[in-house]
Image (cartoon, grey):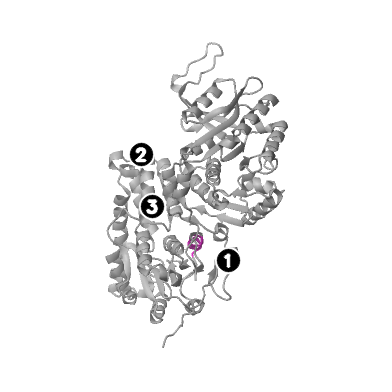
C-alpha cells in the first residue's frame, strides 16, 4: 500500500532559521526606472519645435542583483551584503539610497568614475502602454583596479556570511571582464568550503566549484541544444541536461522549468519539485530572482538542495501572482502558499494523450502503478461527475452568472469591445478553474469584478455572496431534472455514469465501507443519492457542505472523511473522483486514487480535459467510466460477484 506523500518541508522552521542567515550578493546591480508621461501638459520646445513629454510621476526600484537582495530582505534575512559597481551618476546614488533604506550593507558597492554608467532600464509609460525602453550601461568596461578591489572586499567578508550569491545577467556588467571572471574563480577555489550559488545568463560554465541555478533553456544550451525563448523545453531534455551538467561540474544543479517546477540534480540523484497550481493571472517577471533567493536562504540555513528548491518554488509562487511588478515574498505569504500546497504532476503526460500507457485491451490508463490487489477496505466516491450527472452543464450556468456579476447594470448596454473582453476573460477563467472549489472560483470572480470596475465598490459582493447566486441558478436546473425522474419521464441511467450504480453495489457486497463526498449541501446530496437509488449503499456515510459558504466545501468534506477513516486505514483506501480536490487530498494521506475522466453529456467515454486535470492532480489510474467494470474490479482484486 502507498505511504503518505512525503514532499512536505519544515517550512516554519526554515523561515525561523532565515532570520539568522547572512548572505552576500555580488553581481550586476541595476535600477528599474518608470516614467509615467502625461501629454496633457505637453508644450512645444522653443529650441527644437518638438512637443515635450512631461513626466507626471516617476518610480525607481532596484533590479538585477538588487532584486535578489530585495527578495532576501522580504524574507527577513538577518544580514545582506551587496557587492557591485555603479557609476558616478544620480542613478547610482538613488540605488545606494534604496539599498540603505533596506538596511543592506553597501560598503561593497564601488563607484567607477570612468567608462561606467549605472545600469538603468528606463520604461516610459503613456497610460498603460510601455514605450521603447531607454537603457544606460550598455557600453561599460570594468576597470581592473575596481574589479580587484571589489573581490578583495568580498574575500574579507567571507567569514561573516553563510553563502554567496553570484549574479550575472548583463553582458556589459562586471562579469563581462575576463580578468574579473578569472580572479573570482580563483577566489572561489581558495575558499572551496564556502557555498557560492551562481545564477548566470552567459557564464554558467565559467565558475568551477559553484552550485548553479539555471532555467531550462540555459541548461540545454550548455549541452549543445537550443530552443526559442517561447518554445517548450521537453522533460526528457531537461532531465538529460541536469544529469550531464552535474557530471560536468560535480556540484548541485537546479534547473527551473517555470510553471512546471524545478529539477534538482546532486549526489543524491535526480529529484523534482512539481509546479504549483495557481488559479489567478500571473506575471513571471522576477520569478527567477525569487526562486534563487529561496534556494539561497535554505542552503545558507543548512538545508539540503531538494528542500531548498521546494522553498524557492514557494517564494516564486508568491511573486508571480503580483502583477506588473518584480514582487517579493514575506514569510507570511510563503507560509500561506506552502502550508498545504497543491502541485501539478506529470504535465507532459497530461498534455499529450499519445504517451498514455493502458492495461492491455482496456481503457484503464496506468499513471503511476497498478494497486496491489486485495487489502482495500474503504472507498471514497465523489458524487457529481463520478456517479451522478444531475449537475452536468454547470458551465452554462456559471458563464452568464459571472458575466452579469462583472458588468452589473451595464450588462445590457455595454459596448461590444467591453462585452467581448469580459466574455473572453470569463470563459478563460472558467476553463482554467474547472475542477476546483466553487468558493475559490468565486474569489477569482470578486477580483475580476473589481478589475473591470463596472460595479461600484460598495456593491461588489464577497465570494460567498456570488456563490449563493450561482447555487440558486444551478439548483433550479437540478430540481427540474429530479422532477422528470420522479415523473418517470427519465430513468436513473439517464443521470448516472455507465454502470456506476452497479459498481457501487459490487463494492458494497464485497464488504467495503463506502463514503460519498460532495461540496453540495449535505441534504441535497442525500436527496439526490436517494432519488438515484444508491443512498443505502453508503449506510449513512454521505458527506456534504454544512452551511459555511466561506470554506472550501469539498476539501473540508474530504478532510472530515479522511479523519473519520483514520490514518491507520489510509493505506487501504481508494478514492474515485472526477475532480482534482478528492485526488489531491487522498494522495496527501497515502490513499490510492482513480481519476474518473468522464464525459458527462454522453455518460460514457473519455473527457480529455478531465484526464489532463486528474493527472496533474496526482491520480494513479484513469478510467473514463465503469463500462469495463470487470477489468477494474480485477485490478483491485474485488470479485465481480460475491456469493
Looking at the image, is mark 1 or mark 3 earlier in the sequence? 1
Q: Which quadrant is the C terminus positioned in?
A: bottom left
Name the residue beneath numbered marker 1. Answer: 356
Name the residue beneath numbered marker 2. Answer: 453
Is residue 121 in view? no
Looking at the image, is mark 2 or mark 1 earlier in the sequence? 1
Q: In the image, which disc is placed on residue 441?
A: 3
Q: Position of residue 537 (x, y in %)?
A: 34, 77
Is residue 469 in view? yes
- Relative to residue 554, is residue 334 drawn left or right? right
Q: Nearer the viewer, residue 22 or 482?
A: 22
Front of the two marks 2 and 3: 3
What residue appears at the point 48 percent right and 78 percent down from the top-left corner?
374
Which span is picked out in magenta? 607-615
Above-or-below relation of 49 to 93: above
Q: Position of residue 633 (x, y in %)?
A: 48, 78
- Relative to residue 564, is residue 284 drawn left or right? right
Amino acid at each position: 500500500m502507498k505511504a503518505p506523500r512525503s514532499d512536505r518541508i519544515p517550512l516554519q522552521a526554515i523561515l525561523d532559521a532565515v532570520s539568522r542567515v547572512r548572505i552576500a550578493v555580488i553581481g550586476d546591480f541595476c535600477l528599474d526606472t518608470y516614467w509615467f508621461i502625461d501629454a496633457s501638459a505637453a508644450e512645444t520646445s522653443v529650441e527644437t519645435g518638438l512637443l515635450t513629454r512631461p513626466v507626471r510621476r516617476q518610480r525607481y526600484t532596484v533590479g538585477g542583483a538588487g532584486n535578489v537582495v530585495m527578495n532576501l530582505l522580504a524574507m527577513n534575512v538577518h544580514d545582506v551584503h551587496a557587492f557591485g559597481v555603479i557609476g558616478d551618476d544620480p542613478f547610482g546614488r538613488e540605488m545606494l539610497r534604496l539599498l540603505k533604506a533596506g538596511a543592506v550593507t553597501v560598503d561593497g558597492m564601488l563607484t567607477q568614475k570612468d567608462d561606467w554608467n549605472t545600469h538603468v532600464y528606463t520604461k516610459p509609460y503613456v497610460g498603460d502602454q510601455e514605450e521603447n525602453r531607454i537603457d544606460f550601461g550598455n557600453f561599460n568596461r570594468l576597470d581592473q583596479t575596481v574589479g580587484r578591489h571589489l573581490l578583495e572586499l568580498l574575500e574579507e567578508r567571507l567569514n561573516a556570511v553563510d553563502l554567496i550569491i553570484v549574479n550575472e545577467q548583463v553582458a556589459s556588467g562586471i562579469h563581462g571582464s575576463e580578468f574579473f571572471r578569472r580572479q573570482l574563480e580563483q577566489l572561489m577555489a581558495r575558499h572551496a568550503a564556502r557555498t557560492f550559488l551562481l545564477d548566470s545568463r552567459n557564464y554558467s560554465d565559467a565558475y568551477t566549484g559553484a552550485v548553479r541555478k539555471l532555467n531550462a533553456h540555459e541548461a540545454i544550451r550548455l549541452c549543445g541544444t537550443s530552443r526559442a525563448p517561447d518554445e517548450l523545453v521537453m522533460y526528457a531534455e531537461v532531465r538529460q541536461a541536469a544529469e550531464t551538467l552535474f557530471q560536468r561540474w560535480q556540484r548541485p544543479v537546479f534547473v527551473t522549468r517555470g510553471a512546471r517546477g524545478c529539477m534538482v540534480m546532486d549526489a543524491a540523484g535526480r529529484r523534482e519539485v512539481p509546479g504549483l497550481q495557481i488559479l489567478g493571472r500571473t506575471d513571471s517577471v522576477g520569478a527567477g530572482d525569487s526562486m534563487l533567493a529561496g534556494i539561497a536562504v535554505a542552503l545558507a540555513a543548512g538545508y539540503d538542495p531538494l528542500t531548498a528548491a521546494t522553498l524557492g518554488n514557494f517564494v516564486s509562487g508568491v511573486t508571480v501572482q503580483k502583477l506588473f511588478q518584480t514582487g517579493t515574498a514575506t514569510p507570511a505569504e510563503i507560509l500561506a502558499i506552502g502550508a498545504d500546497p497543491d502541485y501539478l504532476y506529470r504535465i507532459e503526460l497530461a498534455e499529450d494523450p499519445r504517451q498514455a500507457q493502458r492495461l492491455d485491451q482496456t481503457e484503464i490508463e496506468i499513471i503511476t502503478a497498478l494497486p496491489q490487489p486485495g487489502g482495500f477496505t474503504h472507498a471514497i466516491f465523489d458524487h457529481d461527475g463520478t456517479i451522478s450527472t444531475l449537475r452536468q452543464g454547470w458551465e452554462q450556468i456559471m458563464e452568464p452568472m459571472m458575466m452579469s456579476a462583472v458588468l452589473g447594470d451595464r450588462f445590457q448596454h455595454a459596448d461590444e469591445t467591453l462585452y467581448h473582453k469580459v466574455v473572453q476573460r470569463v470563459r478563460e477563467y472558467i476553463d482554467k478553474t474547472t475542477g476546483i472549489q466553487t468558493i475559490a472560483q468565486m474569489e477569482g470572480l470578486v477580483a475580476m469584478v473589481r478589475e473591470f470596475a463596472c460595479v461600484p465598490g460598495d456593491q461588489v459582493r464577497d465570494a460567498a455572496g456570488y456563490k449563493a447566486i450561482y447555487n440558486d441558478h444551478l439548483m433550479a436546473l437540478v430540481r427540474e431534472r429530479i422532477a422528470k425522474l420522479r415523473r418517470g419521464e427519465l430513468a436513473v441511467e439517464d443521470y448516472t455514469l455507465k454502470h456506476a450504480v452497479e459498481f457501487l453495489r459490487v463494492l458494497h457486497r464485497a464488504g467495503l465501507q463506502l463514503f460519498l463526498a460532495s461540496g453540495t449541501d449535505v441534504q441535497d446530496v442525500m436527496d439526490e443519492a436517494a432519488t438515484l437509488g444508491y443512498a443505502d449503499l453508503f449506510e449513512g456515510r454521505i458527506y456534504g457542505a454544512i452551511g459555511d459558504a466561506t470554506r472550501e466545501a469539498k476539501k473540508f468534506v474530504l478532510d472530515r472523511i479522511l479523519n473519520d477513516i483514520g490514518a491507520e486505514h489510509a493505506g487501504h483506501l481508494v478514492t474515485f473522483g472526477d475532480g482534482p480536490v478528492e485526488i489531491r487530498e487522498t494522495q496527501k494521506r497515502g490513499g490510492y486514487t482513480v481519476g474518473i475522466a468522464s464525459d458527462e453529456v454522453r455518460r460514457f467515454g473519455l473527457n480529455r480535459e478531465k484526464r489532463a486535470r486528474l493527472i496533474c492532480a496526482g491520480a494513479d489510474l484513469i478510467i473514463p467510466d465503469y463500462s469495463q467494470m470487470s477489468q477494474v474490479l480485477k485490478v483491485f482484486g474485488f470479485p465481480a460477484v460475491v456469493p
